Image (cartoon, coloured by chain):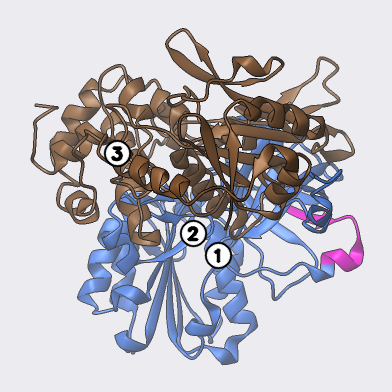
Chain colours: A brown, B blue
Amino acid sequence: MRILELEKKNLKNFLKKISSNGEVWAPVKKENMYIYQKIENFNDIDIEPCRTIIPPKKFMVPPKFTMFKYNKEGYEEDLKDIPNRILFGLHSCDIHGLLILDKLFYDNYQDPYYIKRRKKTAILGLSCVPDEYCFCNETRTDIVGEGFDLFFTYLGDYFLVWVGSSLGDDMVRTAEELFNENFPVERIKEFVRWKKWRDEQFSLDIDLTAMPDIFELRLNSNIWDNIGERCLACGSCTMVCPTCNCYRVLDKVELDKLKGTRDREWDACTLYEYSLVAGGHNFRASRADRLKLWYTHKLQAFIGAFGDPSCVGCGRCLVTCPVDINIYTVSKTLSGEGGFFE
Amino acid sequence: MIDEDPCADLQKISNPFQPEMMRIIRKFDLIDDVRFFQIRPLNASRALALSYKPGQFMMISNLGVGEAPFSISSSPSRPGLLEFCIRKVGHLTSSLFRLKENDFIGVRGPYGNGFPLDRLKKHDLIITVGGLGAAPLRSLLLYVLDNRDEFGEIYFLYGAKTPHEMLFRKEFLDLIDREDVHCLLTVDKDDTGKWPANIGFVTKLFEQVKGIDPKNTFVPICGPPIMYKSVLKKLLELKIPKHQILMNLERRMECGIGKCGHCVVKHLYTCIDGPVFTYWDVINMKELIY
């Protein structure tokens, strides 16, 4: 993979230059949190951001969008007006999150709404240093080998930039003068030292390897009732999870009753209506059953089907859940280490 | 740089969420709250080209109301139109009941695995139905009768609460006289005094099933959860292998094609990995039935 050096001060210039080809979105600090924001002033970009509140899935599957416009003749696909976007500042966990979503939306039936947005979005990754909620080392998502066009590792005065795709290479070529391809080997050594230091910063002790079997053993444990008892069924864990992708479809009618839209919006399996069918039967009426679905899907079923969990260790559920139900407390409790729900 | 349209190749993907408008050509009430709909694509050659398997379902839309999955009740061996049995239970189904002949509905599919017809061939079948379970299993029944030579003995066991609650009552009563199928119908209670067939639960009908080699028998089942419990017990007594008991299940679905997540049980999607599961699958996925 092609590696280049970029001086820190040139990052702005580079992003400004490629912004003629698409909207630039990057993490910006808002109070104590970070959010992805459309960049007008390149000084707003934070180059040492922590996780954003909502993961970048929102660019590929917006929280709400129109799938079809309809009138009495039928349904017309609504797939226009999707802008070219350049996303800067994705951490490796978020890139892995998108790779997991790719599996879902590309496999079997291809979802044109996802695929079109995905193809019109350039991914510019950025290195990070874990805080006390990160555990991507445990989910094997702390490094990334694919799924980005460029990946920037921040090493103080400069970045090392890995070129991950033909599109990434084209972007570099539009501003070749800003990059240095013949940098000293010492830079790589500095990178290795930094990486080693970075890996020592993880502080959460989580082991997910045995989860499929532990879930099988604990499927009917009263731990689930205790967790369900505490859950507020607010759906926040789902909104902030980079791999949660469930949605519902709603038909909206205009006042003339002759036309309207078919809209798709984020849903959460932790909400009461999620498994409710017409006639009133609810396959998952209790909060415990719904939480069990969330956790078995990510930590048992997904490992069984693909070898890795559908969790990228970003820590968003740890930060977000108001009653501390998260991958850490649930996996610890099920493993019998630490009774968070007794 | 980013192409003007990097998605040019996307034009080749047809939108799998796109409903096709079809015309209601016939409708009548099967029982009090269940209506039979025959529908047809607008174009005749398209109508003849429709292909599907018994046990599959389609997503039906009514403009401005919504979309939901419905089992196909017709058989692909009788091409040209699609049939559905729709029970009035919610907003969408109530709106479908307000439609008349020649009105249009949106349809997409067929979806789901359907029954494994190739594996069923040369085997004996005990098609076991309770209540509304006749909606998907009528498709299979008609298919095996239309391709009679390819199957062994065929039993059709159907239990309803009362004669008035039996779907396709006339059609099925007529089958009793046929020599190439054992049609055993039963009602829990005969409130008409004129019911010509059995009285009692569907499990009792198994006493009349004779000359079946369990190892060579498949049992497709569809019915209310309460029926599964007693029938499954019976089938295990009869030594039917668990992977030859085929259950047609249902779930809430918003897409039908493995995207929306609603029908997930463990790593399986009821919509693409099902809706037909074996009893062995069900044992291993405790959430599949309640």
Residue named by callout 3? A197
Q: In which chain is the residue bearing label 1?
A: B
Tell me whether marks 2 and 3 sit on the same chain: no
Alpha carbons under labels 2 and 1: distance apart:
7 Å
In the image, which residues are magenta?
B38-47
Nearer the N terminus, badge 2 or badge 1?
A: 1
Residue B252 in view: no
Front residue of A9/B55: it is: A9
**Disc 1 and disc 3: Cα gap in Å?**
57 Å
Of the residues shown, which amino acid type is indicated by label 1? Gly
Disc 2 vs disc 1: Cβ atoms closer than 8 Å? Answer: yes
Using residue A7 as the reference point, say whether residue A342 is left or right of it: left
Q: Position of residue A333 (x, y in %)?
A: 14, 36
The residue lying toward the viewer, choosing from A86 and B263, is A86
Q: Are the residues flagged by discs 2 and 1 from a single subunit?
A: yes
Identify the chain of the residue marked 3, using the numbered disc in the image: A
- The residue carrying mark 2 is B275
Circles 1 and 3 on the same chain = no
Residue assigned mark 1: B55
In the rendered structure, the answer to whether residue A261 lies left or right of residue A279 reads right
- Crowding at mark 1 (Cα within 10 Å: few <14, some 14-19, many 20+): many
The residues bearing labels 2 and 3 have C-alpha atoms spaced at a distance of 51 Å
Q: Picture coordinates of residue B235 (x, y %)?
A: 27, 72
Observer-nearest residue: A78 or B207?
Answer: A78
Residue type marked 2? Pro
